Amino acid sequence: MQSEIRSVMEDPPPEFPPMERPPGDVAIAELFKAHRLGLVRFAFLLVGDQETAEDIVQDAFAAVHHRWSRLADHDQLLPYLRTVVLNGCRAVHRRRVIARRWFGVEREVPFWSAEVQALLGETQREVFAAVRDLSRRQREAVVLRYYLDLSEADTAAVMGISRGTVKSTVSRALRKLAEKLEENR
């Protein structure tokens, strides 16, 4: 017994070959590292609350991982993720409307934390508040177009609408934002 213990202690541990990760896991992990924060910010601007935004993005990555084998174009994962995040934000808004309609529950979303109020200037807070007051579609179009800096074609693809609709929606949204910000001066 003593010799077996001595043998185990003196022999180096066996080396195992590195585990091969499926290519989908590697691609999703890299995408997660590179774009998670931007997608959380995108979702935050649409739903107005950090925890929900993080949940939406996490669910989007889980959905992509689950559907990996059925995805046709693995080079287009980021646009697909943006669409999944946008649809997740829309689902949150639908649930909030239903809760408000059926149960009279008006959930006040804590949009400004103390840290955000300290870091952002008054002008930035006014702009964010004005963007939040836009209709859902206008807010989505403005955030995709100017916050994520997507082209009209990419914005249209993510929203599932035509390029012309993006142009007109953004135009109306910018007009509303200008009116709202002028009103606050």
Image: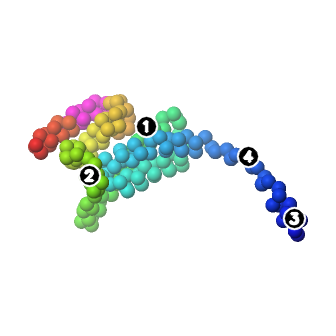
Q: CA distance from mark 2 to mark 1?
A: 33 Å
Q: Which mark is residue 4?
A: 3
As drawn, the residue found furthest toward the bottom would be 1
Q: In screen coordinates, is 83 left or right of 128?
A: right
Q: Which residues are magenta?
A: 162-172
Q: Give the numbered dot on residue 172.
A: none
Find the distance from the CA under tag 3 to the CA under tag 4.
26 Å
Query: Distance from label 1 to label 4 (Cα)?
Result: 35 Å
Residue 109 drawn above or below residue 67: below
Q: Of discs 1 and 4, which sits in the foreground?
A: 4
Could you tell me which residue is drawn at 26 percent across and 47 percent down?
A: 120
* In this view, the mark in front (3 or 4): 3
Disc 4 marks which residue? 17
Within-10-Å neighbours for mark 2: few <14, some 14–19, many 20+: few
Amino acid type at circle 1 is Pro
Circle 3 sits in a helix, a strand or a loop, which is it? helix
Give the residue number, with chain letter if any, for mark 2: 118
Which label's residue is closer to the chain start, 2 or 1? 1
**Residue at 89 percent of width and 65 percent of height:** 3
Nearer to us: label 3 or label 1: 3
Amino acid on which disc 3 is placed = Glu
Whole-Å distance between the Cαs marked 3 and 1? 58 Å
- Quadrant holding the N terminus: bottom right
Q: Which residue is mark 1?
A: 79
N-terminal-most mark, 3 or 4:
3
Tell which circle, 3 or 1, labels the residue nearer the N-terminal end: 3
Mark pair 4, 2: CA separation: 51 Å
| Residue 146 or residue 173, whichever sits in front | 146
Mark 2 or mark 3, earlier in chain: 3
